[in-house]
Image (cartoon, rainbow, N blue to C red):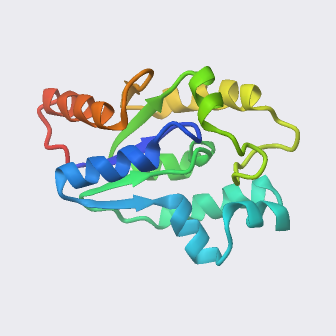
Amino acid sequence: MQNLILIGMPGAGKSTIGVLLAKELGVEFVDTDILIQLQEGKTLQHILDASDYLALRQIEERILLGLEPNQKVIATGGSAVYSEKGMQHLKAHGYVIFLDLPLPQLRRRIHNFNTRGIARAPEQSLNALFTERRLLYQRYADITLACRGKSAQQSVNILISKLSRLNQPAV
């Protein structure tokens, strides 16, 4: 039984699709951004304000490496792919699914880019972040799910169909 690990840009729908997917499969949903906030007692933006994006990435790596997932749907933070160790740990426990959404759609969804708690270099634009991360998402993905023009439920249905074609239990 495999875990399903969702990766992608902020605004791609990892948490929304993750909750629906977990409900559909009857398994637990885990959001690593929430785990970070619970462990640190601060929002992601407060962590960034108190230190910097590299500190947030270190905390994120520690959370990823501490996961011992069993039959779960896991939504990672958008910056999880910067941790080679963290991603290898997750890949050893399940399928990594890249929720691929084009930049124009992301731009429409992200209205709070500067206050959302996104681990990025100061002054790094959404365009630059998208270009940098997209290559990493593609590198780690076992499955890429094109989400352009699809509702969250349509994306879940397509993903379940893709997983069944792999002849593997989804979770």
- Report whether 51 appears left or right of 23: right
Residue drawn at the location 66% of the way across and 28% of the way down:
130
- Report whether 73 appears left or right of 49: left
Question: Which residue occupies the foreground of this view, 42 or 109?
Answer: 109
Whole-percent x, y for residue 51 in the image: 84, 64
Q: Vertical placement of 161 versus 119: above or below? A: above
Number of marks drawn: 0
Residue drawn at the location 73% of the way across and 31% of the way down:
126
Q: Which quadrant of the structure image shows residue 47?
A: bottom right
Q: Which quadrant of the structure image shows residue 11?
A: top right
Residue drawn at the location 55% of the way across and 21% of the way down:
102
Whole-percent x, y for residue 81 in the image: 57, 42
Question: Which residue occupies the foreground of this view, 141 or 98?
Answer: 98
Question: Which residue occupies the foreground of this view, 88 or 24?
Answer: 24
In the picture as drawn, the residue positioned furthest to the right comes out as 123
Whole-percent x, y for residue 22 in the image: 27, 53
Q: Is residue 65 visible?
A: yes
Whole-percent x, y for residue 131 in the image: 68, 24
